[in-house]
Amino acid sequence: MDHRGGCWDTVLQPPSLSISHDSDRQSLLVSWWVNHSSLVGDVYEIQISRSEIHTVIYNKSLSLSSVDSDEYQWTWTSDVPLECVDHSVRMRQFYNWSVPSPWTDWVTHYGAQAQDKTTIFPSMRVLRENTRAVFCCVPPKGVSITSMTYNNTKYPLLSIGVAGVKAITVPNLTIPTALIKRLTLSCSDARGKTYWAWNNISFPPQKPGNLRCATSDMITIICTWDSGRERDPHDPNKQTHILYIENSDQAPISCKSSSCTFPAVPQREEYNISVVVKDQLGEETESYSFNISDRVFPVMGAVMVSPGVTHATVSWVVQGNLSRLNLLCQVTTDPYSSTQLSCNSASGLCEVELDHLLPNTRYSTRVRCSASGRLWGEWTHPVSFTTYQMVTLDVWRRIKQLSDPNTRQVTLLWTPLVPSSADTVNIQGYIVQWSQGGQNWTESKDSGQTQAEVSIDAGRHDFTVQAVVLSGSTIPAHITVPERDDGEIPPAKKRLSSNTAAGFNLSWDNADIVTCGYTVEWCILGNAVPCTDALRWMKVPEGNNALVLPARQFKAGCRYTFDIYGCTENGHRLLEVQTGYSQELQSVKSPSLVEPVQSTSSSVTLKWSYNEDDPAHPAFITGYQVTAQEVGSDHFNVSVVDPHIKSVTIEGLQQNHEYTFSVSTLTKDGPGLSTNITIRTRTNLDSAQLAKILTPILLLLGCIILMWPQRKMLKDIFAYPDGMNIKTPELEGFLHETAKQLQSQKVEECSSCVIEILTTRPPLAVTTALTHPEPLPGSQSSPSLSCVPLQADYCPQSVTVLWDGPALQPIACIKIKTYLRTMDEDLPEAQVMFTGIHSSFEPSESQQESCSVMYAYISNDGCNIPNQTQNC
């Protein structure tokens, strides 16, 4: 009804709508035709639902005040991927904000339908950093999802209104720190199957900052900007940068990430440009306007310099066609001057004259220009040059005394003080003059020679060398050779310490006789080789007594000698000789050991040979280091601080031990290469060991001495005819006394002493056996002696005794065997008992013999063992 109560005969019709989708942005695009009738208001209500039952999840009223076209589009972005579930849209129109039209039918965008395997959404997409995301798994019909993980983390499952479809929510997406910026998703279903998908995380484009444009030649324009946050090179969210010239019909220009170059538009001064940065997550735009004439920064070509003695001409070329602009250029000379001038040459060539420069002085110059002083171009790279000088010579000499005392050979050397370029000063040659006692001599040299040899006598001579040039001034150089002085004081010698950073720091004492400065002379090849054309010298003004020579002019590990001369009215006198290295090296040669090496049980004396003053050494020799190490033990060092001492005795060693010794040469940086030798110390026989060795020998000698007075009795005992009994009491008594003496001896370990007295005789036809008697019942066990065959004509450790008497008389063989046993502290004193004495004779055709063996045992139990005799 209208305001008068009448009814409308026209029924409101719902709008006709259609939908489309953008899966990358998870959005629905809703379109409908707008009714422009003045009787109907443009107010709409839109609803969005999910699933087949149309559960409304979004409702919005939309008022359209003015629409340019008949079709209107509205976009809605879903928080759930559109593939996960069906999404439907319907709408209705309102009249006067209150009277609605009927709802349109639901227009549906259908979700994905899985066939035989579960599908994960979203998949293979670029997702926005720091946003909330929903992921879903769409299984085949009748299959349920049991779990979902995001980046190997399990999340609780959510239902979104469709049977079987499950989802998870990740509250904050972050860019992985790994090389590949991917995050993985997985779905596991009730069948035990797991499915995987991945997505990339990135950030949206940023607005270009500090956009600016300029040109160097009015032909090409270069625009630059700050691209903002740096993007990982492996980020799949690739960006595009497009520059648009808004006030021109030129096509868009594709650019780099932070700059863009494009040709200037003919006859156009003003430019309105915009730069659009776009990627999968959005786009950003920045605009800029400029006048090309105000944005000119001239670029210069190569700068050329033509030096003179007190001036130099500097020229350069301005690139591009800038003749119509008022160019202003600046030229600076370091040190001393700066010049500014205008340059409007049609060819672009600019030139300036630099005046009031110093002769033989090094300068550097650079140039920059501006168009009307608005925007200055970049400074050119500095160009160095040296002004010319008045031609002079630096002269030096070397004096060699010949075999004739009145003849010396002088070598004059000179260096022209002119620039190295040949076309600067054209030297035609040199004139050498010298005088002595009113006589003058002259010699000419060509331009390629810089030395001359002259023979002079022992008197003083004055020399002059002058360069011959086509133009310019030349100043003669003078030097005086003093007369020979046999009483001249030898120069002081000094050793320099190396300094790798500064080279050589030379200093010397000021001499009162010096009136015109000092000269330092050295050989650039060092001391190890003869110096011919490698001689160098440097003049030091009077009042200065120090000179620094850079290390780059010298070779590390090479010894140099610097001769310091003082200039006097009568010539130069040698004041000091300083020797050193710019850098000492540690790799010095190893010494040579002198063999054989002397050693004792507790010390070893090492001697070696070495030439510590050899100039070929890469460092000064400060001493030697001797290292001693026992096999398997730690080593210790012994240092010899005097390089002239070449021997050392290492004491405190252990006897009969093997040691490894190494001898190396010391420099200030440490030891160099070493020479090694392995030596075993000798054995030291102490009193206990000597007692063990000498005791059996002394016992044997004692027995022999004690038995020697009884030699006749022994002869009577063992030499009577066959069939008679042997009288042994005297011998038994003697042996008993001997056993008592042996009893008092203290021994440390069980040993045996066998005393044998033999006389040589013809061999017996029969070999007898000696057996020990059986031990007494009830006695402690005694050493077991087995039956030992005794060969009559053989006795070990024998002593031959020549007897007085007939050659065919019987010969006796006596063996005394003593067995000693170590006594324990808790046992009684050992007793000596005789176990038996027995003698027998075995006749032969020509002689008779007898042999008795007496045994004495020293036991610990003190029991009495009766004498026993056994036949051999």
Image (spheres, rainbow, N blue to C red):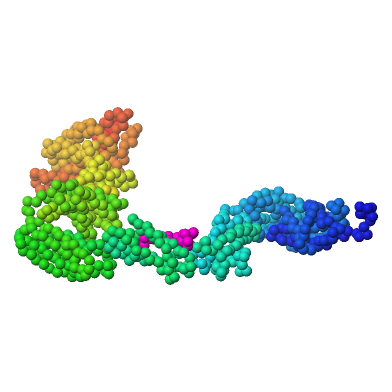
Horizontal relation, residue 559 to residue 401: left or right:
right
- Figure check: 305 above or below 153: below
Horizontal relation, residue 661 to residue 375: left or right:
left
Which residue corresponds to the image point at 24% horizontal and 69% vertical from the top-left?
426
Image coordinates for residue 70, horizontal then vertical, percent: 79, 63
Image quarter (top left, top right, bottom left or bottom right) of the C terminus: top left
Can you tell which quarter of the image residue 16 is in? bottom right
Which residue corresponds to the image point at 34% horizontal and 61% vertical from the top-left?
354
Which residue corresponds to the image point at 58% horizontal and 63% vertical from the top-left?
271
Taking the magenta stretch, the answer to whether it contains residue 374 is: yes
Comparing 392 with 260, the one in front is 392
Can you tell which quarter of the image residue 530 is in? bottom left
- Figure check: 234 above or below 719: below
Q: Residue furthest right?
A: 6
- Can the viewer see residue 526 in this picture? yes
Horizontal relation, residue 735 to residue 49: left or right:
left
Q: Which residues are magenta?
A: 365-384
Which residue corresponds to the image point at 26% horizontal and 54% vertical from the top-left?
549
Image coordinates for residue 735, horizontal then vertical, percent: 20, 35
- Can the viewer see residue 184 in this picture? no
Image quarter (top left, top right, bottom left or bottom right) of the N terminus: bottom right
Comparing 379 with 330, the one in front is 330
Comparing 745 with 72, the one in front is 72
Image coordinates for residue 146, horizontal then vertical, percent: 72, 52
Taking the magenta stretch, the answer to whether it contains residue 222 is: no
* Picture mark count: 0
Image coordinates for residue 858, horizontal then vertical, percent: 26, 34
Comparing 756 with 308, the one in front is 308
